[in-house]
Amino acid sequence: MNSILVIDDEKSMRDFLAIMLKKEGYQVQTADNGKTALTSINKNVFDVVISDIRLPDIGGIEILKQCKKVSPETDFILITAYATTETAVDAVKMGASDYIFKPFDIDEMKIKINQCLAKKKLERENVYLKRSVEKQFQFDNIIGHSPKMQMIFDLIRKISNTSSTILITGESGTGKELVSKAIHFNSLRKDQSFISINCGAMPENLLESELFGHVKGAFTGAVQNKKGLFEVADKGTLLLDEIGEMSQGMQVKLLRTLQEKTIRPVGGTQEIPIDVRVIASTNQDLQKAVSENKFREDLFYRVNVIPITIPSLRERKEDILPLADHFVKEYSHEMHKSIFRISPEAMNTLENYDWPGNVRELENAIERAIALEISDVITVESLPEKITHLPQRGDNDLFHLPEDGIDLEGHIEQIRKSILIEALRRSNGVQKEAAKIVGMSFRSFRYYAKKYRLTKTMVLT
């Protein structure tokens, strides 16, 4: 229940407001003078204080000042029969949420209280959402245990609080936007906006308007002034995704903005100063594009102040299973399923696939598997055929199938066991080294070594 303090030296007004507010479901305390009111404010946290401006000892304005010192988040509504517009304006400047003249309509009072509480609820939700987003992009919550990703995290920690322009490169699906958000939410700009735009998703004239804004009448359809994303992201971060797709004309305009730190809306004449941290990302080789005259060399050096290259998933196989486990938990919860693990065979399949679509492809594969799986564990059968399909071999490589058939599962198990034994022999019994030789994670290798009871003594004797 929201709590309200009513301060008025007139008993009839005080009792009337208390009865009305209690019927509305609020917890209500009352005070008939300023001294009593301040005692209550110092001992309790109120959502709203409603006070007459004229009291026998301490005036409502002074109570307002003291209340804001003790409890800045408390909304304060002043009521009086004697006031001018100037008095009302001064009260609002001092922190009053609203001002009501006597005699007032009871519905008006209810509306103003509801507005205060709704605003307070929205502010609390915004704080909660902001903290949730910040937590989501803390380094501990970004999955990347491989040495290459740890080096990237170390670099982000060093550069987050600078304003230098960053160029993030990497294949599609590697998580370039995720890294961009990690930079923003671990920087001094984290309380300001993070905005991204795909530079290859719109024509040049529309992209210019999106980035720099436009004034009314600048072109057909410009019926009102519009702020561009640079201005909206002021004091925050702007991600220019797929910057390599930007036209030569837009490259010139972007270069000027980065050099001058000002923008000029389309059709406008005034320069608008901006303070924006720019992060650019692309899956293209911009240096090659420069040599082919497809990307301006001066813009390349302007955005490539701090380069970050995100490795492909096949270059960091150690991250495949942690990522897969994360997606299993995420989509199991989303689809209300009780699937919390991946079978060893499915883990081995995931690790041995090259993942041309990188993390995004892995996420899609796990989402599909969760949707199709009817047991409580992800099996190979639930994975996409593209991932599980073995490449065709030539006739000379085919295994000769006996006339009376074979135990296929047992045969595969025996082949796997023989390969693991040989890998352990080559690595002198060190399981981590043996796992690298056969392209498996240490976790999967340890599972099979335990299953086949492979010990160092056994394989080296």
Image (cartoon, rainbow, N blue to C red):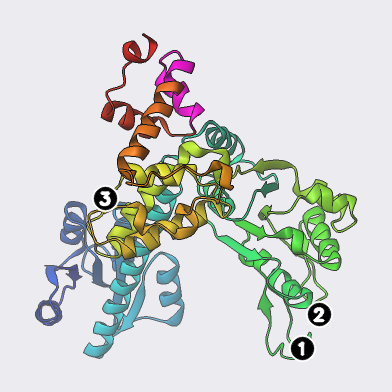
Q: Mark 2 = which residue?
A: 267
Residue 104: percent from the left, percent from the top? 26, 88
Residue range of the region highlighted in magenta in the rendering:
423-438
The amino acid at mark 1 is Gly
Pointer 3 or 2: first along the chain: 2
Residue 143 in view of the camera = no
Q: Which mark is residue 340?
A: 3
Say which of 207 and 108 sits in front: 207
Contact between marks 3 and 1 (CB within 8 A): the answer is no
Q: Residue at x 33, y 41 (%)?
A: 344
Seen in the image, is 130 located left or right of residue 313? left
Contact between marks 2 and 1 (CB within 8 A): the answer is yes
Q: CA distance from mark 3 to mark 1?
A: 57 Å
The amino acid at mark 3 is Phe
Q: Residue at x 81, y 56 (%)?
A: 260
Q: Which mark is residue 295?
A: none
Say which of 191 and 6 sits in front: 191
Quarter of the image that includes the N terminus: bottom left
Q: Mark 1 = which residue?
A: 217
Residue 362: percent from the left, percent from the top? 47, 53
The amino acid at mark 2 is Gly
